[in-house]
Amino acid sequence: MIKLLRISKESWKPKAPFLGKLSVMMVVLVLWAFANTAMAQETEVTGKVLDPSGAPVPGVNILEQGTSNGTVTDLDGLYSLTVSSPEATLKFSFIGFEPQTVPLNGQTQLDITMQEELTGLEEVVVIGYGAQKEKEMTSAITTLKTEDLVKTPSSNAMQSLQGKVAGVQIVSKGAPGASPTVRVRGIGSFEGGGAPLYVVDGMFFDNIDFLNSNDIKSLSVLKDASASAIYGARASNGVVLIETNSGEYEQEAKIEYDGYYGIQNPQNILKMANSQQFVQYVNETGSAADMAFVNNAMQAYGRSRIDPSIPAVNTDWYDEIMSTAPIQNHTLTFSGGSAKTRYSIGGSYFSQEGLLNETRNEYERVNIRANVDSKVKDWITVGGNFTFSTAKQYVGSDAAWFNAYFAVPILPKYDEDFGASPIPLSNAQRLGYRGRQNPFYPLQYNDSRNKVNKINGNLHAELTFIPDKLTFRTAYNYKLDMINARNVNFTYNDGVLNPLSSMSRTNSLYFDQIIDNYITYKEYFGDHGLTATLGQSFRSETFERLNGSRNDLDPNPTFENEELWYLNNGQANDINAATDDGSRIFYLSYFGRLAYNYKEKYLLYATYRRDNYNKFQVDSEDFLTFAAGWVATEEEFFDVKGIDFLKFRASWGQLGNDGIDPSVGQPTLEGTTTAINNVRVPGFRLNPTYDLINQVETTEETNFGITAKFFQNRLSLDADYYIRNTESLAVTVLQPLFRGSVRRSVGEIQNKGLEVSLNWENQVTEDFSYFIGGNFATLQNSVKDLGGPSYLNAGSAEFRQRSIIGQPYEAFYGYEVAGVFQNEADIANSGYSEQFLADNDLVPGDFMFKDQNGDGVIDDLDRVVLGSYLPELTYGGNLGFRYKNLDFSVLIQGQSGHSILNRKRGEVIFTNDTNIDAELATNLWRGEGTSNRYPSAAGLRKGWNQNFSDYFVEDGSFFRIQNVRMSYSLLDKEVLGLMMPETRITLTAERPLTIFNYNGFNPEVDNGIDRQVYPIPAVYTVGLNLKF
């Protein structure tokens, strides 16, 4: 459903400083005035426009940049234009050719040779330690440009990939500044996580939360092993290669502002039982104690005038804790270049406030960056880039979402008579409930924040020994992350308890360095093309962490004395033990790549990497890949009308995952006794109960793919089928003959699937073009080996997950509900044995669990796999058009074939004295034929119905309109006699509609367990882009 925008008073209360609209307008006016201060003498320019073969090109549009002054070439490709200044800049454009922008620099005669627009196949794609023409690629790589990334209002660029890249699952997060979960081709580790490796300008990162989307030039997802294996032991979960903006040589100075301001709106708010439904539910449970709580509420707060049998209070707790919240981003960039030097310098400010009311719940980030390259000599280019990012994140308590689900509606927000202080919040314990329930306690009396400073840098030099053939590149990369996490709990009185204040603080420092040296040789021998790369890489990763905590701070912390929030302030004996730890890991790696093609028809590709490290006992690992491709359309015999390009690809490769914790152990001797000739004899035996993780997890992947273009390159197809097997997985297994469990590198897991992307683009006229496309990916995840046991438990005993050989990783595991007993006859005919029925006292309104083995007893043998949180199908689609200066696009995405554990519902039936959601309250079993899905109210509190079953596991499928965007460009407009800069105004709606059946806020749940999950809002923004 779509919720109307509701802007509360609190949502507009500034929670942190941000760039005001007046400041933005002042910057715009100053830049605009600056761009129009120079006036010069008119000059006539003439010339000719030719194509690469030397033939004239008629109809080429020629425009004096920054004005409406222009002309077109005649039939002979000639033109004449009077411009405002000898230093003016002309822009040449025509369908099928690359646009060119050329400064006159005093010239009055300017001839231009237009270059044909690349079809996509001739474009160069960034790969690990180099680049490759798309036509010659044999790997599964998807590349996005800046314009694809800036469409999404988010703190993290990876959010923009949602629905756009087949085989990449992006799980959104709603909390301010939270990074999405990214999975490339499933899950391949039990302990090492599933996030890909991010390589930004050569540096390794675990996430890119420091990076502004506007600063990214290109983002490439390396999905298969042949593309990723050159990164070795870090590449098993895929690699995301990011190249940042660097300016252009021979480009006039440009100033660009890009920004947006918007509102985040809570959507799909879960409806809880109101007071009337809640009282009805309590009555139906038959609980005299709970009914007494209801009577206490009527005595304390009065009775409803409409229905005196229910309390007057009717609190919607989700409505109380949530409001709309602003989000904004502003970026200012200066770029340009001469024949020898290019540069890009900029800064950005991002701010996102959270949906939670009356608490610090926000994220702010400021970025400064610079990127400069210079051709010092014809044979050497040097450069560097630098990024500084500082961010503050105030984390609202997740417990508020949990408590809002449980809090009874007959409790008001405030209670002046119960004695709570300093804020008179209500407390359900006044009515007799066990807990206070009010979700504002964790909001009002907790301050949790992270301060993050990140400094990233790169210095590089490239030497050209033989032009266009032999180059050598050396680069030094570093990153320094300083993270200060602090959590403060204030002292207060809730009318019953007076908890002490407490504080914990963690300071973490990460310092990583990478030195890369590699040489690249390119050669063409007639019809043969060869590219070879050979390199060495050194990497060090240093980590330090200091943690401390204390209770009963003195003075008591408040928002007014924040300057006193230090561990030193308090009684000496209240300081808890501090922890101080760290690590340092070294890597020395060698890598090589060989790419060969014959007439760009037959393609061969191979890489090798050897990683040496001090992290594991097995101190080195080798990773190989081989790939081949056949461009069928280059064959003389291939002449199929409508098929412009057809390439078949196949690859095999090895990857590694070093993201697991090593364990070094040895067997020990332990005392024991045995019988020899009926005599008890003491002795010793070897106890193998020790951990041993001494190597990286290894992956082998096979990939088959097709790349094709049809109908004059308007229609493009990319399809891949892959099988990815990961072995030597670190798993924790029980020792059947000994005590305890051990970690061993014995697990194996498999992911396989099909990925298809199909896109149509058509330039109908110079003024009108449109596009439509879609993609989908399937995933089959299964556990293959656990080193002996047939399964491995996960989750809690009440909500069991289990990794079973042949089934998906950590699948939900429990009883299958066959229905609800409607009458005594149903119970008698259930197939359960008489003894079993007598022991369990089943009544109408109870669940009927399926007896899987037909033995008349419901026990552990009847538990089955109930579903997996990994979607079997993900898909996306987009369509849009451009007409003159108007652009419009729509992006959709969705997924199906996965399940969600509604743990909030599960914990309700264990605690008993809480609220329930409205859908459950409405559809409880209330007599024969009333419900075959939900038990009775009394049944909710019965142990039989609390057994973990598919009642708690729901379908997580959804369809979403992910993004709707409309923009209009204002070109060649004058205001008050001054020429406006190139201006684009954009309206965006992010996630305006999501359709799903799951009984929760949102079907996007990271690990499939919905307990304390921050809701994901819809976002509506207005944006402005100015180019000077």
Image (spheres, rainbow, N blue to C red):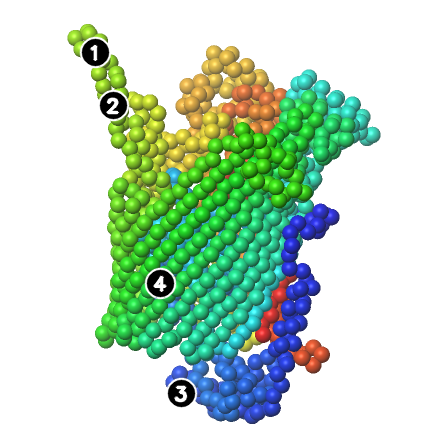
- The residue tagged 3 is 54
Please, what secondary structure does the residue beneath circle 4 have? strand
| Amino acid type, mark 4 | Ala
Quadrant assignment, res 918: top right
- The residue tagged 1 is 681
Please, what secondary structure does the residue beneath circle 1 have? strand
Q: Disc 3 vs disc 4: which is toward the camera? A: 4
The label number, if any, that marks residue 669 in the structure image: 2
* Cα gap from disc 1 to disc 3, whole angstroms: 101 Å
* Cα gap from disc 4 to disc 2, whole angstroms: 51 Å
Please, what secondary structure does the residue beneath circle 3 have? loop
* Cα gap from disc 3 to disc 4, whole angstroms: 41 Å
Q: Earlier in the sequence, mark 3 or mark 2?
A: 3
Tell me the quadrant of the picture where the C terminus can be found: bottom right
Residue at x 68% of width, y 17% of height: 288
- The residue tagged 4 is 475
Please, what secondary structure does the residue beneath circle 2 have? strand
Q: Earlier in the sequence, mark 1 or mark 2?
A: 2
Residue 41, compared with residue 419, is above or below; it is below
Specify few, some or many for label 3: CA neighbours under 10 Å numbering under 14, 14-19, or 20 or more.
few
| Amino acid type, mark 2 | Leu
